[in-house]
Amino acid sequence: MIALGKMRGQNLILAILAALWVATIIGLSVLSPAMFNAGTVTNILQFSTILSLVALGQTLVILSGGAGIDLSIGGTVSLSAMLAMLAFKAGMPIVLVPPACILIGLALGAINGLLVTKLRILPLIATLGTLFIYSGTALAVTGGAAMSGVPAWMLAWGRGSISSLPLPFITIALPAFGIAGIVLLWTAWGRWIYAMGFNERSARLVGIPVDRVRLLIYMISGGLGGLGGLISLAWLGSGRPNIGQNLELESLTAAMLGGVAIVGGRGGVGGVLAAVLLLVTLKTGLLRLNVNTVWQVGVVGVLLIAVLIADRLTTHRR
Amino acid sequence: MGAPIAMAEPFLVAKGITKRFGALTALAGVDLEIRSGEVLALLGDNGAGKSTFIKVLAGAHAPSDGELLVEGRPVHFASPKDAAASGIATIFQELALSENLSIAENVFLGRELKRSVLGVPFLRRAEMKKRVEDLLVELDAHISDPTAAVGSLSGGQRQAVAICRALNLNARMVIMDEPTAALAVAETRKVLELTRRLAARGCAVVLISHNIADVFEVADRMVVFRRGRKVGERLRSETTPEEIVAFITGAHADVRALEKTK
Ligand SMILES: Nc1ncnc2c1ncn2[C@@H]1O[C@H](COP(=O)(O)OP(=O)(O)OP(=O)(O)O)[C@@H](O)[C@H]1O
Ligand SMILES: [Mg+2]
């Protein structure tokens, strides 16, 4: 029941991203023909898995409005992985590490949600504060050292793949996007998120429990961060205190590139997944071409601005 | 139009409603009765307290003092949801519609028809669309597609959507705050017609307007607010636009007398 105009906007963004992606792949394979093989695809998807999960959380937080943003998401990834490993070292059975990552993520997200909905702190400030707290604590618990000891069965899943598609990507990331897409489009909850994101006052007047929904969404974002932490353990084989570094900026970029309006209420998850794949392809390609990291960041910035301009132009014509 | 007024038991009675915002008294002891099947107009200068009063009726503000009775029973509204449960629907001055959603989605927002699958409330879109289609036809609103985005509608059409929403909630009383303020002539006609149609269905209708001509066209009874007090109440058949204007500006003898006693 979504308006035609909005669908057009979403499809337009998907089309632009697909075109950019194809252009990137063609460009990179001309520059370095040996680059694209099954191994590279696996590699790109592996790097995409964690980013796609936190970008999904970021997207939900932004969509639901109220100047929503989750800057702490990278800290949540690092801290959930570190605390779960710490608990394991302290005697918690290893089978509890996966649920522990998720629960810790949910709890960290709940802290953000409570700061925003109960104490009414601006999300930008609240999550900037918790970013420092979470990522600082992740470093502090081991004094910056990694924590090894991830068992083989977790590694088998974290590093495994089926026909060059990494297992974490197809068992976690894709289902997460599928579920989010279905909830947003076909359930009452989805309508509430769009309504409160676009016009919070009216959402409150019709009786939508705005604060409860928002708290839940910050928790979901944290939980997705916890999943990201879990995947980092299973993939890398150790808990690394800085694994979540820069994820807040990259997830934000993916959400914006994917057509999510920063003011909330507009956008979808399909574009965000496409944007994550584009970003990671570009970064991987530039890395392989030995391009300076400064330029890698610059290219991402140019992309972001180009897509925003395209979006602005089409919105104005409507 | 206003024949059964004297007979009917009031749907809502407000007694001594007072509302203070800090040191400012926005409403001072307002008594008012609102009857089913009747269009009641609230008039008054900017800042007279009209919007504040209907926000109290709508559950958006708790009164600082006073009592509300719905069908003779005292009620206390903590939120618009409570008011809605008592059959009161409000169309606020700033229309509470979500422009990024469709007409049908707006009509059902917050009370969607759903089918629960494993506790997940999936939307029953076809049914919601059908129901809204029927309501739009019944109101003769000239909107053909309930799946169109509200953002693409004109001001009058948006009022129609908001009225649909109220009807869909089975509202017994519909409150409209300046529904015609931003509308062109033809659209204003349409909304006034909708207002009469609501009353004809047995709804109590409360309407705020600054346009005296509109009010005389549509209202059965008029109540004038001034500086937070009710200064005049007249049946349309017993008054003239000149008298109502005198009430609003404070030139009326009754208002002078009232303001002297204060
Ligand atoms: N939430 C609030 N907090 C403080 N003061 C308020 C609030 N809402 C209204 N007021 C004040 O109460 C008084 C009455 O305002 P109200 O909006 O009810 O007037 P009104 O009759 O609807 O005017 P208008 O015709 O301009 O819409 C005004 O002085 C206004 O500034
Ligand atoms: Mg007003």
Image (cartoon, grey):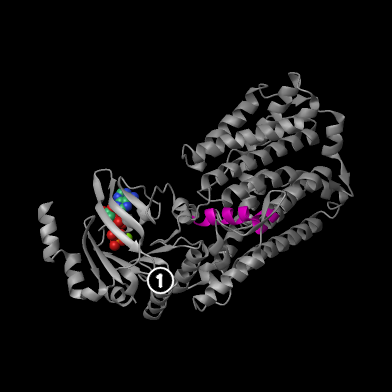
How busy is the neighbourhood of tag 1: few (under 14 within 10 Å), some, or many (20 plus)? many
Q: Residue furthest top?
A: A90
The residue lying at 78 percent from left, 57 percent from top is A25
Q: What kind of residue is marked 1?
A: Ala
Q: Is residue B249 left or right of residue A24?
A: left
The residue lying at 18 percent from left, 74 percent from top is B242
The residue lying at 60 percent from left, 42 percent from top is A216
Residue A193 within the magenta-colored segment of the rendering: yes
Q: Position of residue B172 (x, y in %)?
A: 44, 63
Q: Secondary structure at mark 1?
A: helix
Q: Main secondary structure of the magenta part?
A: helix
Q: Position of residue A105 (x, y in %)?
A: 66, 35
Q: Is residue A169 left or right of residue B38?
A: right
Front-most of A118 and A252? A118
Chain at tag 1: B
Task: Identify residue for label 1.
Answer: B199
Rendered view: B224 above or below A89: below
Q: Is residue A187 visible?
A: yes
Name which quarter of the figure residue A49 lies in.
top right
Where does the magenta region start and end?
A181-199
Q: Is residue A292 visible?
A: no
Name which quarter of the figure residue A304 lies in.
bottom right
Q: Position of residue A14 (x, y in %)?
A: 69, 62
Q: Residue furthest bottom?
A: B186
